[in-house]
Image (cartoon, rainbow, N blue to C red):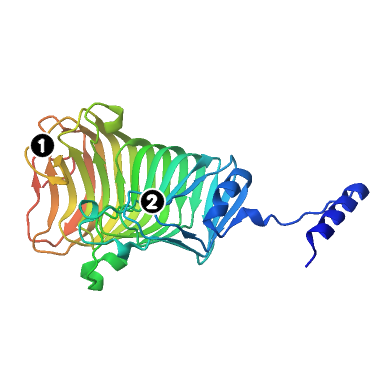
Amino acid sequence: MLSEAVLVCLALFGFQRGIAFKFADSDCTVTDFGQLSNAVAKCSQLSVKDLTVPAGKSLEINLLKGATLTFEGTIKFDYEEWDGPLVRIGGEDITVIGAPGHVLDGQGALYWDGKGSDGISKPKFFKIDAAYSATFSNINILNCPKHCTSLSNSRDVTVSGWNIDISAGDKTITGSKKEAKNTDGFDVTNVTNLVIKDSVVKNQDDCVAVNQGHAMYFTNLECTGGHGLSLSVGFSTTSVEDNTVTNVTFTDSKVIDSRNAIHIKTHRDAGDGAIKDITYKNIQFDGVLHYGINVEQNYYKGSGKGDPASNIPITNLVIDHVNGSLHSKEAMPVYILCGATGCSDWHWSEVTISGGGEESSCNFEPTGYTC
């Protein structure tokens, strides 16, 4: 092992002779939380490896323009009851990748009480915030305390090859006394030009929940144990833009053993907004417990209740080649509850749903489908 003095002499000698020496910058491999801020500020090639994040702290990483971040080994987050997020990443022209065998472990079992957001304070896990022209590839997330991945205030983002696994918190599958809840896979707000593809989500809430944004494409997703592929719109009482979702496509995906396959819900206590140009195509599902397709305009405080409203109209909803099976006697193939002027210009084709013990219920019928 060369001493620091010898390295300095070699470097000076090389400079005088015109010889280039390149020494590895170990400061860009973060293995201790105290290294993080300096590494983020200076490194364009950053690695976070085998790190334990102290309780109540975020892995806050605002990357340099054009930087690459790699997760390696096990990244673990110590327990504390707080809101989080445990990870927040942003930057421009950035690349975030997971090395083979890595895992980000939220230690969710320490929090799970079967009450989700209504129980003890649980941190959200992974937040992509203020990311522009960014790719996030091959990330393994294990045991989220609550919401797993949130994307917000971003544009031109591609997410691919993710594995989000909270199956240990599924009481019906594992028999565990610790039950996870509100473990959304991907929540999306104020994002434009988003692609999420080639990913697996095993959870207990929406696989995907689009709340607000434009131009999104979801493809080759496999969702197990949650609430399906969802739009949930209407979280503002004043802003039309905050209650607007346009140009969203879900395609070539599977939903397994979930509450719903497709779920679109608008919040009747919100201000005005709009859902427009939405497509679900080539969606396969099996073992769905409640609804194959559920569209409801009366969502209020966590569930559909009361009369529907037309404050957030749904226009040009295309459902094409969606088929699958229901698993319980209480399950219903299709449920549509629209406000008086809340639904228009829907086109459905090749929708085939088998099983279940309830007849479909629709107060609005799409072109091409009879309830």
Q: Is residue 212 left or right of residue 67?
A: left
Q: Position of residue 256 (x, y in %)?
A: 27, 62
The residue wearing badge 2 is 219
Residue under the image location 50 percent in, 67 percent down: 101
Residue closest to the eye, 336 or 366: 336
Q: Is residue 286 left or right of residue 19?
A: left
Q: Nearer the viewer, mark 2 or mark 1?
A: 1
Q: Position of residue 273 (x, y in %)?
A: 24, 29
Q: Position of residue 154 (x, y in %)?
A: 43, 37
Residue under the image location 34 percent in, 55 percent down: 253
Q: Position of residue 26 (x, y in %)?
A: 66, 57
Q: Tag 1: residue type?
A: Pro
Name the secondary structure under disc 1: loop
The residue wearing badge 1 is 308
Tell me if residue 277 comes above or below residue 252 in the rendering.
above
Which image quadrant for residue 261? Answer: bottom left
Q: CA distance from mark 2 to mark 1?
A: 31 Å
Which image quadrant for residue 270? Answer: top left
Residue under the image location 87 percent in, 50 percent down: 12
Which image quadrant for residue 343? Answer: top left
